[in-house]
Amino acid sequence: MQKIDMNSPEFQEKLEKAIKFTDKVCESRGWVYNPEDEITESVQMGLARNKMMYNKYFCPCFVVEEVDGKYQSVDNRICPCTPAIEKEIPENGNCHCGIFCTPEYAEQKRTENDAEEAIHTHSRGLSKEECEAILSKSELDGDELAALIEARELGMVDFTLVDVREYMEWQMGHIKGADKLVPTSHFYQALEEANLDKSKKVIVYCHVGSRSAHVARIMTDMGYDIGNLTYGIVSYGGEIER
């Protein structure tokens, strides 16, 4: 295994060239860097490493292997790779590695990051824009859900909060502000009876997040805009009704 000294003059020279290379990629395609500097720096270092080892800017997120005496990566992932250009960035706003983004995605991510910092440090209240950015996420933690429930009470955002545990669990305690109970034991029947509005964001939760994650995948495939409380009600620090 080849070991590369990141402090060596050779690597630093390759890194400088890799940074200039990614600068040109952004400029030529109208992309911007990820607002999280650690992601950008990590990918640039990976590109520099691969340039030293293979003399190509192979994407550092994918395996490089030798085939018939030549090095190649999965799906021909040479930066800027075809999957990123044709599918990932147009559809998702960023590439698989995360370094290249559309300006719109980067701004949304920056807003999310600012809101998350405010939520977790309790340093200030959130703006309507920040609340909407948090609401757009597919995975939420307990602090984020508590902030969204408060924002909903203030009329800043709107969503439906759905408990997917069983009725006896609901009776033992549920999140204050939960709108519907859709138990997984008879999910499809309960979902039909709940008559949820598909035009409105739906946030689901269970005990520790496993059932709700499964439900989230099903409901997303059914056309719902879903957010999931990642670690369930046990991670929620807000008010519980019993």
Image (cartoon, rainbow, N blue to C red):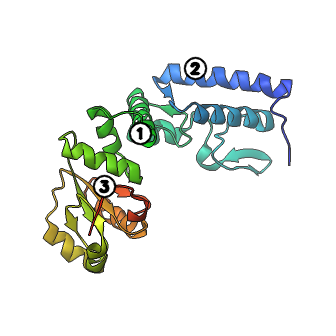
Q: Which residue is mark 2?
A: 24
Instruction: Give percent across and percent down for residue 110.
Output: 43, 31
How packed mark 3 is, by other alpha carbons closer than 10 Å (few <14, some 14-19, many 20 or more), is many
For this rendering, which residue is in front, 190 or 20? 190
Asked if residue 140 can be seen in this view, the reply is no
Amino acid type, label 2: Lys
Sequence-earlier tag: 1 or 3: 1
Amino acid type, label 1: His
Q: Which residue is mark 3?
A: 226
Disc 2 to disc 1: CB gap under 8 Å: no
For this rendering, which residue is in front, 108 or 93? 108
Disc 2 to disc 3: CB gap under 8 Å: no
For this rendering, which residue is in front, 144 or 67? 144
Amino acid type, label 3: Ile
Give residue 25's quadrant in the image: top right
* Location of the C terminus (image quadrant): bottom left
For this rendering, which residue is in front, 54 or 148? 148
- SS under mark 2: helix
Disc sitting over residue 122 in the figure: 1
- SS under mark 1: loop
In space, the residues marked 2 and 1 are separated at their CA atoms by 39 Å
In space, the residues marked 2 and 3 are separated at their CA atoms by 37 Å
Number of numbered markers: 3
